[in-house]
Image (tube, rainbow, N blue to C red):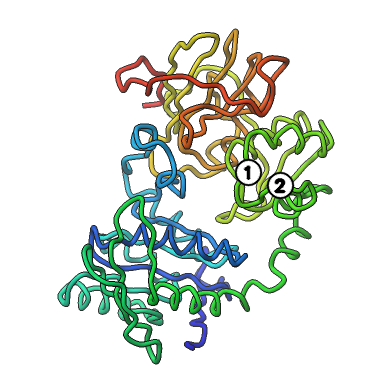
Amino acid sequence: MDTPHIKYTKFGLESQVAFNPLPAVAIGGPPHSGKSVLAYSLTRALRQRNIPHYVLRAYPPDYEGDWFYEGAREWVHHLRIKGARSEAWLPLVQQDVARRHLPLIVDMGGLPTAEQERILDECTHAILLTPDVVSRQVWEARMAQHGLVLLADLHSELRGENRLVSTEPLLQGTLAGLERRSEATGPAFEALIVRLSTLFKPATRGLRRRHLEAAPVELAVDLAQLAEHLGLAKQAWLPSDLPEVLEYLPQARPLGLYGRGPNWLYAAVAAHARPAPFALFDVRRGWVEAPPLEQGSLDPDSPLAVQRRALPEATLLEIRLLDAYLDISEARGMRVPCTADGGIILSGKLPHWLWAGLVRVCQARWVAVLQSQTGGAAVVASEGEPEVGEIVDFVGVPSETDNSESGS
């Protein structure tokens, strides 16, 4: 097994050097070789083994995550962020990788620019997934140039047979059929899971406890332990779990959440805690508090765009980032038009800390968050009917031409 490749990263002043012992594994290969499917398959398998980690898609970051592979197709394509207005996101993502709080799997995309390749300077290991000799040579040279330890050299075939060629000194084999909405299988994939587990496990020993001890609030709740205590399925939270979760947690008290969970779960607990502070563990930033937002029209230079659509008894607010990356420092004090006479349905692809801030500033009889897997919305706060935890069904995808409030 390869020894962990340790890197020291400069932060700020040239004299400031930080050591990060957590591995960051980059997946490299040309477009359409199946990298995103492999990353999704890896994270599912590692979660089943309770191996802490995070998948970061850095081309540019679109907060895509598992929702894109599991949601209703017409919704996820509409909500997906299409790209970046600038390269301003690049140093921020590079910093996220360098200051990682969990082991990372980094999907570099198929055509990184020379500037985007700098992200590889903050990684430690690499996996190659290529369909031919030429692309393999290009990506092998790219990873070597940035000093990465090669864990696996995998051949991608759309129509072929899964094969394991060798495990030592380098894992080699074939992954076949890596099409969107499929999952990687076969002996080479299983061997890769073993290799990543062996790499990640020692690095994360005691990490959860240290993270929880660093929480800025007295009551920081580990979602995995909460699910176990309540007898719920921690790998598959359901909106119907919300009443039991909120009954268990104190209301209007400072709360913190730690661990993997859907955006509507974080939003519901953030609303439950108000007006007291709410904190969450962000794998990019560590512990952060929900940013205090203000009610009102978007500022001309707002980093958000908001589209409003009238629905029966509710207003649909589609919120999107105008650039590929929003730093939490930009959000504090930001104005958002989150008010309605009936209910509000929030839609978009946003970081959890922004969902938490949005739901705490909303003024409506009830607030729901779009659940892309069903095409409905999970009620996360309510003064009566519908109740928290219910799914509000509605039909239709917001029109691209609807009137919007935008900071651009």
Circle 1 — which element? loop
- Residue that badge 1 annotates: 237
Q: What's the residue type where badge 1 is placed?
A: Trp
Locate residue 110: give its quadrant.
bottom left
Q: Residue furthest left?
A: 134
165 or 128: nearer the viewer: 165
Residue 181's label in the rendered image is none
Dot 1 alpha-carbon crowd within 10 angstroms: few under 14, some 14 to 19, many 20 or more: some
The x, y position of residue 287, in whole percent, is 67, 52
Q: Which residue is mark 2?
A: 232
**Discs 1, 2 touching: Cβ within 8 Å:** yes
Work out which quarter of the rendered image holds the C terminus and state it: top left
Please tell me whether residue 53 is drawn above or below residue 329 in the rendered image: below
Q: Residue at x 58, y 76 (%)?
A: 21
Could you give the CA–CA distance between mark 1 and mark 2, rounded to whole angstroms? 7 Å
- Residue 260, how many percent across, how many down? 61, 51
Left or right of 399 on screen, residue 343: right
Q: Which image quadrant for residue 270?
A: top right
SS class, disc 2: loop
Quick check: 405 above or below 136? above
Left or right for 384, reference 390: right
